[in-house]
Amino acid sequence: MATKHHDRRTDQFPSCLNAERLLDLKVYSGSINRGHKHVTVQSGATTTKLLSLDVFAPHFAWGFHGAGPDELSVAILHDYFEDKDTKFGGRIAKLYGQFTEDVTSTLSRDRAWTMKEERVEKWVNAHAPELTSERSQG
């Protein structure tokens, strides 16, 4: 009797997304070290520091409404859309306030966190589905 090969990796993911795509998704992580907050982006085996665009604040914060969480929202959306332009405007200016309200302000203020790119994508699809097709056209 022939044994059929079964890849368990695909069982862990929603059927609407294939396993290869999910393995390429980014993961945003916030951490606190000696009172300083840092955010990294992991894509595959590569981890880099998420860069602030210095629109509202020169640093990131989360867990409340203010300049730091707004800056984090701008940076995450900028990274998500893979914008080449470092100027603040367009779709990011349109979305960051509500993203802060719904996402970055709700993160635990004094704890580390992780956020999968899929969460950002679902949020964008729910709030501005017309922008999903514009991704990577920044």
Image (cartoon, rainbow, N blue to C red):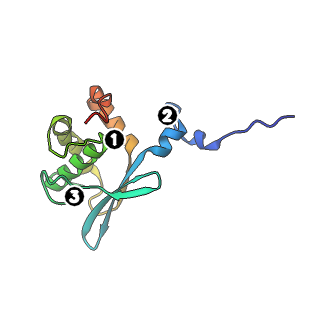
Label 1: few (<14), some (14–19) or many (≥20) C-alpha neighbours in 10 Å: some
Q: Amino acid at mark 1?
A: Val
- Residue 91 screen position, x and y as percent: 20, 35
Residue beneath the point at 59% across and 39% down? 10
Residue beneath the point at 73% across and 38% down? 5
Residue beneath the point at 40% across and 41% down? 118
Q: Is residue 57 left or right of 134 when viewed as pictured?
A: left
Q: Is residue 47 left or right of 137 when viewed as pictured?
A: right
Please state the total of marks drawn on the protein image.
Answer: 3
Label 3: few (<14), some (14–19) or many (≥20) C-alpha neighbours in 10 Å: many
N-terminal of the pair, mark 3 or mark 1, is: 3
Residue lying furthest bottom: 34
Q: Amino acid at mark 2?
A: Leu
Q: Disc 3 designates what residue?
A: 60
Task: Name the image quarter holding the C terminus.
Answer: top left
Residue lying furthest top: 130
Q: Looking at the image, is 137 positioned above or below residue 77?
A: above
Q: Quadrant of residue 51?
A: bottom left
Q: Secondary structure beneath disc 1?
A: helix
Q: Disc 2 designates what residue?
A: 17
- Residue 109 screen position, x and y as percent: 26, 59
Q: Quadrant of residue 128?
A: top left
Q: Secondary structure beneath disc 2?
A: loop
Q: Quadrant of residue 125?
A: top left
Q: Disc 1 designates what residue?
A: 120
N-terminal of the pair, mark 2 or mark 1, is: 2
